[in-house]
Amino acid sequence: MALFRASLNHVAPFLTGVWHHVSMSNLVLLQFLLCPLVFIALLYNTAPYGRHFAPGWGPVLPNRLAWFLMEFPALLVIGIVLVCSQQDLRATVLIPWFMWSVHYGYRTLIFPALMRPSGKNFPALLVLFAISFNTLNGYNNAGALLANSSADEPLLSGHFLTGAAFFAGGFWLHFSSDRAIRNLRKDGFTGYRIPSGTWFNRVSNPNYLGEILQWLGWAILTWSWAGLAFALFTVCNLAPRAMANHRWYRQTFPDYPSGRKILFPGLF
Ligand code: NDP
């Protein structure tokens, strides 16, 4: 018993130290907990929008409006939290905020405006889920930026530069792949075609891959639990859909290139 107490006396301060080091807000913890739930749910039920649209999910919204409503909270919430923080917004906050706003400005305004939807609708239930998630995520990531600013993090650290490079490369891949998909309907066609091009020749979903790289970059750049939770959530959200899309392409097009991977070139 004495031995047990003695070892506990050594272990307890260590565990307290670890806990103090890794402690994160409950809302970020919630975001981590959502990851496996979302992954398993989406593995067995593909989100019913776009090519996987299925009736029976309640009221629906037009595609463009749905995308606007879903993505806007991410743009809005981070802005409100940062502006209302009464903290001195230094470059360590302003530059990542700008990068976040470029992404969500694109997703909220440009992507819906340019998209060539086939006339399918979007379940309002999914829109509600996405609004809730984007609100939570915007709030958590604003907190991460403010915490970095108070900790007097240097701007040009190794992790900031590495993360920014991943983010920029991922955004370019995401944006250019969305454009390539959009161009498949340039002639007014409203069905589906096999996409091709450098990245599409390697994987079925380079737009998702680009977005995953972006948020991985964001996690490295902000070096925060909130950033990591978002990167993990993006993988859990997009990987099952990438699998469903890949399966759908192979079932729909008998001549679909057999060497094309799902998401990661040469791997998956
Ligand atoms: P898709 O690429 O499946 O669809 C985008 C648009 O392109 C839709 O208008 C779709 O039409 C059309 N389209 C898709 N494939 C073809 C094809 N083979 N031929 C012709 N037209 C096609 O992407 P998602 O709708 O799943 O996602 C859109 C964007 O949102 C992606 O860039 C993705 O990265 C991002 N996203 C991010 C998430 C995250 O967790 N961060 C979650 C979900 C999406 P239709 O509507 O008729 O199918």
Image: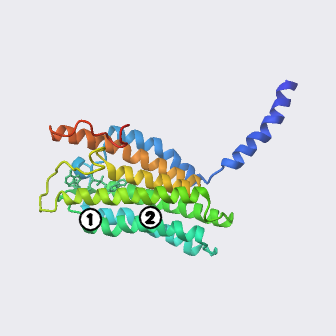
Foreground of the two, 70 or 265: 265
Q: Quadrant of residue 114?
A: bottom left
- Viewer-proximal residue among 87 and 209: 209
**Residue 5, quarter of picture:** top right
Left or right: 245, with 91 as reference point: left
Kindly give the residue lying farthest to the right in the view shown: 2
Q: Which mark is residue 74?
A: 2
- Residue at point 51%, 72% (across, down): 80
Kindly identify the residue that appears in the image at 36 percent across and 38 percent down: 266
Is 123 left, or right, of 232 in this rendering?
Answer: left
Residue 162's place in the image compared with 260, above or below, is below
Dot 2: within a 10 Å radius of its alpha carbon, few (fewer than 14), some, or many (20 or more) residues? Answer: many
Query: Within 10 angstroms of label 1, few (less than 14), some, or many (20 or more) residues?
Result: some
Q: Relative to 124, is 211 on the left or the right?
A: right
Residue 47 is situated, as x and y percent measured from the top left of the image, at 31, 47
C-alpha distance separating marks 1 and 2 = 17 Å
